[in-house]
Structure formats: structure tokens, C-alpha cells
Amino acid sequence: MAETVLLVGGGGREHAIARALEGGDCELYACAENRNPGIARLAAGFETLDTTNSSAVTSYAEEVGATLAAIGPEKALESGVADALNEAGVFAFGPSSEAARIETDKAYQRRFMREHEIPGCPEFETFEDTERACEYIDSSDVDLAVKPAGLTGGKGVKVIGDQVTREGAKEYLRENDYDRVVLEERFVGEEFTVQAFVANGSLRVTPAVQDHKRAYEGDEGPNTGGMGSYSDAALELPFMTEEEYREAVRILDATVEALDDYTGVLYGQFMLTADGVKVIEYNARFGDPEAMNTLPVMNTAFLDVLVGAREGEDLPQLSFAPRATVCKYAVPEGYPENPSGGTRIEVDEESVADAAYAAEAEEDGSEARLFYASVDEREDGIYTTTSRAFAVVGIAGTIAEAEAIAEDALSGADEGVRIRHDVGTEALVQKRIDHANELRGE
Ligand code: AMP
Ligand code: GLY
């Protein structure tokens, strides 16, 4: 084998990365806090360790003779795992802890945007004092998004006028007394994600994806890490124009230009508003679930991206199968607020296999895939943790077909887990289209 790749992280995103490397000229090793059975099956070795412990990750990389590393989770990036691997001579596809601040420090992120005049930045202020922040909320005559500056697993933001009232926002800040918070103009619109591979100053973009952050059907309930997502057979989504997609790409381009020497995935979270495309945030890694939409339809080998990045080359031009995808997550009961971790669950691989068999029989490139996420494989079975458990992805010519395949694959999965069955349905996609048309005044 030409390369030995160490994959860091044990969620659905990392299972998708492992699948994207399968069949390439590389041997895979993986490390994570949980033993992800999907990744373990594809890897020559799997080590359970704390992925924020740089020296533990680096020791394992050296032990297995890794020539490349792909880092999934933001917490590992924040704690400097990419820096440590690079220092040890293992090329890490993932930004340094300093460069990852574009995600891990939302105050820095907004100041960076302002300083470099990156389009799509909201009006914002940063605060180190909770009472000052509360005064600002009282004095502001627009709705605000309240954001703790540090990482919160996608669950820390509260939007006034959407999830909380002004009073509720102040209560939230006083209860948590964060060290630093960002208060910014609330955007109203439709959210979407565009992920890009970045290395050696070049940038390669992937199709837009829409995630569903809210816990319950109909976009109700608290924010989660993401309950499911879809992408279309084109680069843009049904509620967007090609030009709106291109605007998001221009913003990513401007961001990469301003970032000094960034390596890894740059994830842009955008909001299509009445005023054009705005930036909700950046992430310094693949999205989870978005990686499960993107990597299965990428024709270009992910290994070629990793090797090109290491060799200082321009990254390969990417090609994608013209296929829509719908990803639905199964999460523990009570997730995200009171997740019932530590429960043994049956993951019905047979239903997925049957759905995959039926989809493939269509002979049009349709597929069904299962991705294990934050579950732990023990001797007597698979146990949930307090995070998302597993996901299925339907892949087909249209979103509606992909959605039907995902549902077919999930037919055996309901016990002990919760699923947002509305993700990717025609009704919900139409709601997005109507909303975007309304924003444009159409
Ligand atoms: P984040 O943790 O930054 O991904 O934010 C979580 C969610 O909060 C986003 O997916 C949005 O739905 C919402 N959000 C963040 N910033 C804003 C904003 N400026 N306006 C409206 N919603 C926002
Ligand atoms: N899907 C949102 C995230 O990965 O942060």
C-alpha cells in the first residue's frame, strides 16, 4: 500500500471519510473515543483514545507508520492535533489550532470577517462581561443572535425572536455566564452549507447541502448537531439559484484568500436572505451530517485530495455524480437535552442492505448507505452514547427518490432512537422553496 492514513474521530462524518478512502491505495487506521463499528470494520487497526490528547494521537500515528492523517472533529483541531501530527512528520489534512479559530472562536471569526471585508458579515459586538451583553440586548432595537464564543457542539446559539425572547436571552446569558459572547444581527432566511477542500492556496468546492438543526419535525425544538440533510443532483439546492450558490463560493474564495496558509476542509454555513447570501459561521472541518451527503457522490478519490495537499500541488478538480442525497440521523431518545446514552440498540443492517439492493436494482446509480456515528461497539453489542447514533443516506436521481430510499433503509429502526422523518420530504423541500421565493418578493 502506498499510503497509511490515520483517521481521527468516530462519528458519522468519519465513517463517511473511511468509506471515501475504501478501495484506494491506502491502509486505514482510526482512533476515537468510541469504537465506531463501521469504521472499525474498514480499518486495519482501531485505537480508543481521547482525540483531544495530541500526544496520544501522535503516538498512535507513529506506531502505525501513518503517512497522512484526516481529522474530523473540531475539538481535536482546537486542541492542536494537526499541529502535533505535522511536527511529528505526519501530514495532517486539517488546520492548525490557530487557523481553526475561524470555527473555535466566534468572536475572532467575526473580527476576521470585518477586518478582511469579507462579504456577508452581520453587524456584531463582542462582550466579556455578561451584564454589558444584557445591556446591549436591552438597548438594541433589532433581533439578535446570541452566541457563546467557544465551541458548544452546535447547541449554544440562541436567536431572539426565534427560539427566545429578549428576557429569555438575558436569562440564558446570566445562567451560563460565558467568558465571551458575540451578539449579532439576526438573519432571516434559508440556511445552506457549502464545504470546500483547501490546501496550497487552492480551493475546491462541493455541492450545497441543507442540514436540519432543530430536534423535532417541522423545525421545532432545540438546536442539535444536525438531524439530517439533503443535497440535489446539481451544485445548488432547489430553493437557490446558480448565482446564489456562486455568491457563497465567492465568499469562501475571499475567506481563503484572507486566511494565511489554511489546510483542510473549510465549511461555510450560509443564510439566503432577502438581502442576499450571508455568513452564519465557518467550520474548520467537514459538516456532520453534511459529509455523508457529499463524500458518497464524489467521483474524485478523497485520497488524491489528501496526497495533493501534502505534495504542495494544486488540488485535483472535483467531479460529482449527478445524484441527490437524503441523510437521516437516528438519535438517542431525549437527545439533545437529556439523551439516554448507554442503551444497547439493534441497528438493522439488513433493512439497509435490502433497501440498497432494491435501489441498486434500479440500475440508475441509486444507493442506500448506513453510517455508524457516536455508538460504541462492545463485546455484547452496540451501545448509544449521548450523541447521534447512526444515519442512513439515500442516493438517487431526485431528492424525492433519495428520500424514499432513506425511509426504506430505516424501516427496521425505531426502537430506542428518534428520527426526523420529514427531512428531504417533498413537503418540507417545497416549504423551503416557498420561503426563499417569499424572501425574494416573488
Ligand atoms: P452555529 O452554532 O453558529 O452553527 O449556530 C447554530 C444555529 O444558530 C445556526 O444554524 C442558525 O440557525 C442560528 N444562527 C446563528 N447565527 C445566526 C444569525 N446571525 N441569524 C440567525 N440565525 C443564526
Ligand atoms: N452540521 C453542522 C455541523 O457539522 O456543525
Image (cartoon, helix red, strand yellow):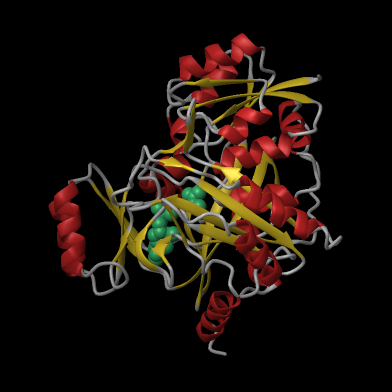
Does residue 325 appear left or right of residue 358 in this picture? left
Query: Can I make out residue 122 in this image?
Result: no
- Quadrant into which the C terminus falls: bottom right
Front position in the image: 386 or 208: 386
Q: Residue at x 15, y 67 (%)?
A: 167
Query: Can I make out residue 150 in this image?
Result: yes
Q: How many marks?
A: 0
Front position in the image: 347 or 268: 347
Q: Residue at x 67, y 62 (%)?
A: 405
Front position in the image: 220 or 98: 220
Does residue 430 appear left or right of residue 67 in this picture? left
| Residue 172, quarter of picture | bottom left
Q: x, y (%) of residue 385? A: 40, 38
Q: x, y (%) of residue 145? A: 32, 62
Which residue is outermost to the top?
A: 63
Does residue 373 appear left or right of residue 188 in this picture? right
Q: x, y (%) of residue 63? A: 60, 9
| Residue 412, quarter of picture | bottom right
Q: Residue at x 61, y 36 (%)?
A: 38
Which residue is outermost to the bottom?
A: 442
On screen, 50 above or below 330?
A: above
Front position in the image: 226 or 142: 226
- Quadrant into which the N terminus falls: top right
Q: x, y (%) of residue 253? A: 64, 52
